[in-house]
Image (cartoon, helix red, strand yellow):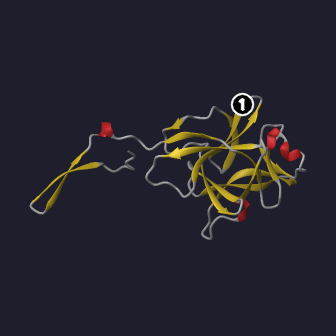
Amino acid sequence: MATNNCIPVQFLETSSNAFYFGAESESEVEADSYTDSFHSPTYNLQCKDNKFLLLNNDGQFQLQDLSAQEQCRPDCRFNIHIYNDSSLEQMQGISVMLYTNRNGKKIMACCRDHNEIYPEAMDLPREIAEAAHKALFCLTKLSGEKYMFESIAYPNKFLGFEPVEGRPSLKKLVLRMKGPDGVDDSSEVNLNRCNE
């Protein structure tokens, strides 16, 4: 059972119009965690101006215009690996990791300070014990095929896109802060299912 920093209790008895409870020992309590669902559908990720996310030859995430044929390349196909969340304060949406494959390795989209998203090769964890993992996101459906990815490690920050300096036709993947009016549409992603 996940406790969310509360002490779990067990009902013992009633007596003289009172209820009596006993605290469970801490050894009986499991920490909040994320467990592998063994489900990883494959998608193309498309932003509002019809550019597609890819892992470029330099090993960086970027968005660019792609023809229908180019969209089938392996560096444009992303897996959304789903995790089961045991926490009591589940966010709206599902817990996921976003990755692509290159040279037999899984390349994860990871978050770090300064709103950066960077690629990192790692194996998919079967269980994540920490509450905030750098590669874990909450995937929320908006409408139709539109979704948002909120960072678990950086709450209220969402995967988004911004132009690459000096190359306005390219965009890079970043974290965008949720403002008072919500998140702007640069954080909305269309998920287009890839044919396997």
Quarter the C terminus occupies: top right
Q: Is residue 177 left or right of residue 58?
A: left
Q: Is residue 24 visible?
A: yes
Q: Residue most toward the front?
A: 196
Q: Is residue 55 visible?
A: no
Q: Residue most toward the left?
A: 16
Q: Is residue 92 left or right of residue 80?
A: left
The residue identified by callout 1 is 105
* Residue at horizontal 70 percent and vertical 36 percent from the top: 107
Q: Where is residue 119 drawn, in percent x and y?
A: 71, 39
Q: Is residue 35 above or below residue 104?
A: below
Q: Residue most toward the top?
A: 104
Callout 1 secondary element: strand
Structural crowding at the residue carrying mark 1, measured as other residues with C-alpha within 10 Å and reported as few (<14), some (14–19) or many (≥20): few
Q: Is residue 96 left or right of residue 189?
A: left
Q: Residue most toward the bottom?
A: 181
Q: Quadrant of residue 150?
A: bottom right
Quarter the N terminus occupies: top left
Q: Is residue 100 left or right of residue 135?
A: right
Q: How many marks?
A: 1
Q: Amino acid at mark 1?
A: Lys
Q: Where is residue 84 drawn, in percent x and y?
A: 53, 45
* Residue at horizontal 77 percent and vertical 29 percent from the top: 103
Q: Where is residue 12 drawn, in percent x and y?
A: 18, 50
Q: Is residue 17 above or below residue 66?
A: below
* Residue at horizontal 40 percent and vertical 46 percent from the top: 2
